Image (cartoon, rainbow, N blue to C red):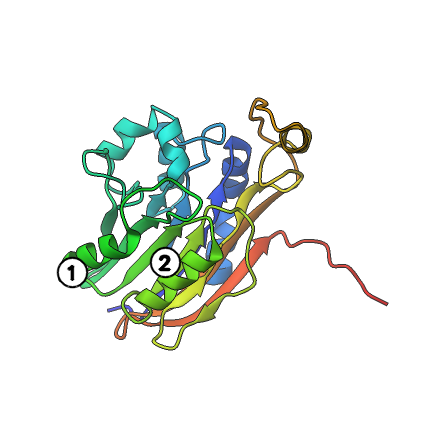
C-alpha cells in the first residue's frame, strides 16, 4: 500500500493556449514533484468560460484525475450536460438542488487508497448560494465513511472567507486549496491539525494580462465603467500550482510547495 499521496494541483486554466502549454509541460512537473494524483481547475478553459468534452478529454489523457470548476462554468451551456454525465468533473456542492453535476467525487488511487475531492463556493462578494459551511458538514459525514483523504477546492473571492473555512476544516480534511482570484498568494502552510492550505493557487494562462484578460479591454472596463467584450490575452504563459504531500495513514499533509512554471524573472535590489 502506498504511504504518500503526492498531489499536484494546477490553478485555474484560462483558455486553450494555456491548456496546450500545460499539456506540453505536465510531464516535467509530474517528474519534479513525483505526483501520483492531479487536480486542475478548469472553469475558464473554453474561451474563458466553462469547458466542453474536448478540453476534458485532453486533460484526462495527460493524467489528470479530477477537474474542478466554479461560478463561471454556468456561463457556457455546453458545460451543463458534461457536469451531469462526468463525475470526475465537479462543481461547487453548495449550489441549490436541481443544478446538474457532482459536488464531490471519490477516486480509487490504488488498492485500499481512495481520494475524495470536493468543491465549495464562497458567498462573500459572490452569488448568495447555500451556506458552504453547513453544506460541507453534511457531505463530510458521507465522504468520511469511505475515505479520510479529502481535498477541498474552495472557490471564493475573499481571503477572509477562505481563511475562515480553513480554520473550520483544519484536521477534518487533508488540504484546502483556494481558487478563483487567479493571483497566487504567499500564505501556503500546514495548519496546526495537519491540513495544508493556500488562499489562492493562482492562474495557469497568459500573464501578459489582467488575470487572463486582454489588458486594454480590462483597463477600458475599469476606467469607463461600461461593458466591453471579454477578450482573452495571449503570450507569457505560466503554470501556477501547488504540490502537496499527504500521509495516507494519518490523512495529514506533510508539506505544501507553491510554484509558478516558468518562474517570474527575479528583480535584483542593490
Q: What is the number of the mark on residue 51?
A: none
**Could you tell me if residue 34 is visible in this image?**
no
Quadrant the C terminus occupies: bottom right
Q: Is residue 265 left or right of residue 249?
A: right
Nearer mark to the viewer, of 2 and 1: 1
Q: Is residue 127 left or right of residue 231?
A: left
Element at badge 1? helix
Quadrant position of residue 71: top left
Q: Nearer the viewer, residue 3 or 265?
A: 265
The residue at 34%/42% (across/down) is 128
Q: Which residue is mark 2?
A: 36
Question: N-terminal of the two: label 2 or label 1?
Answer: 2
- The percent position of residue 84, horizontal first and vertical second, equals 23, 33
Quadrant the N terminus occupies: bottom left
Vertical position of residue 236 compared to residue 191: above or below: above
Count of number-bearing discs? 2
Amino acid at each position: 500500500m502506498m504511504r504518500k499521496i503526492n498531489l499536484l494541483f494546477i490553478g485555474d486554466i484560462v483558455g486553450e493556449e494555456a491548456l496546450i502549454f500545460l499539456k506540453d509541460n505536465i510531464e516535467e512537473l509530474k517528474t519534479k514533484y513525483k505526483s501520483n494524483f492531479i487536480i486542475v481547475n478548469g472553469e475558464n478553459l473554453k474561451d474563458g468560460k466553462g469547458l466542453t468534452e474536448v478540453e476534458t478529454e485532453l486533460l484526462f489523457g495527460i493524467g489528470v484525475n479530477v477537474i474542478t470548476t466554479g461560478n463561471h462554468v454556468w456561463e457556457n451551456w455546453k458545460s451543463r450536460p458534461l457536469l451531469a454525465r462526468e463525475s470526475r468533473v465537479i462543481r461547487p456542492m453548495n449550489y441549490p438542488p436541481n443544478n446538474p453535476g457532482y459536488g464531490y467525487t471519490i477516486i480509487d488511487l490504488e488498492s485500499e487508497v481512495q481520494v475524495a475531492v470536493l468543491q465549495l463556493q464562497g458567498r462573500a462578494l459572490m452569488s448568495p448560494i447555500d451556506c458552504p459551511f453547513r453544506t460541507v458538514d453534511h457531505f463530510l459525514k458521507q465522504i468520511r465513511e469511505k475515505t479520510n483523504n479529502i481535498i477541498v477546492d474552495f472557490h471564493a473571492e475573499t481571503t477572509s472567507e477562505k481563511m475562515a473555512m480553513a480554520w473550520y476544516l483544519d484536521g477534518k480534511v487533508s488540504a484546502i486549496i483556494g481558487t478563483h482570484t487567479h493571483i497566487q498568494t504567499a500564505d501556503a502552510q500546514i495548519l496546526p491539525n495537519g491540513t495544508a492550505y493556500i488562499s489562492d493557487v493562482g492562474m495557469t494562462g497568459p500573464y501578459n494580462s489582467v488575470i487572463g484578460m486582454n489588458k486594454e479591454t480590462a483597463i477600458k472596463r475599469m476606467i469607463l465603467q461600461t461593458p466591453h467584450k471579454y477578450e482573452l490575452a495571449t503570450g507569457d504563459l505560466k503554470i501556477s500550482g501547488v504540490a502537496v504531500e499527504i500521509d495516507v495513514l494519518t490523512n495529514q499533509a506533510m508539506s505544501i510547495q507553491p510554484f509558478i512554471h516558468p518562474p517570474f524573472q527575479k528583480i535584483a535590489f542593490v
